[in-house]
Image (spheres, rainbow, N blue to C red):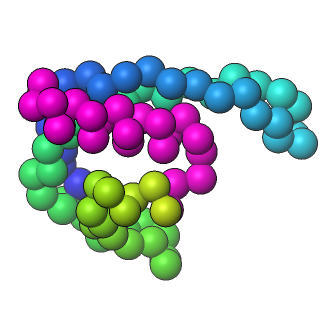
Amino acid sequence: MDVVVKNFICKGGKYDYIDSIGYFYGIGYFYFAEFIDITSKPKEKGHELLWVDIQDCCKYIHLEHQKWAVHQAINILNNKKY
């Protein structure tokens, strides 16, 4: 997939626990991006690109700091600071 990375949205993190490594702090950097083109087929069976409305996407996101980043993006878009 071809995308162009645009403006920075925010940085968010979350402490979590995984049996294989124990506690860790995952950090995410979130950016706006522009979709250009699909350049290849999915590498794994059962994987597909699914576009959803930004207002609905948090239904499909499991990590709280990712949901928080979506809300930050919505606030930026609503304030037209992008």
Say if 1 sits above or below 4 in the image: below
Of 67 and 18, nearer the camera is: 67
Range of magenta residues: 60-81
Q: Quadrant of residue 51?
A: bottom left
Q: Is residue 55 left or right of residue 66?
A: left
- Residue 64 falls inside the magenta stretch: yes
- Residue 14 lies, in percent from the top left, at 65, 28
- The residue located at (19%, 25%) in the rendering is 7
| x 19%, y 60%: residue | 39
Residue 68 is inside the magenta segment: yes
Task: Note whether 40 is above or below 14 in the view shown.
Answer: below
The quarter of the image holding the N terminus is bottom left
Q: Position of residue 19 (x, y in %)?
A: 89, 42
On the image, the x and y values in percent for residue 75 come to 27, 34
Q: Give the total of numbered labels.
A: 0
**Residue 31 visible in the picture:** no
Is the magenta region chiefly helix, strand or loop? helix
Q: Quick one: quadrant of the C terminus?
A: top left
Q: Position of residue 48 (x, y in %)?
A: 38, 72
In the rendered view, would you say 12 is above or below 56? above
Position of 65 with respect to 4 (left or right) is right
Quick one: 75 or 24, which is closer to the camera? Answer: 75
What residue do we see at 51% from left, 24% from top? 12
Picture quarter containing residue 9? top left
**Residue sitting at x 15%, y 30%:** 79
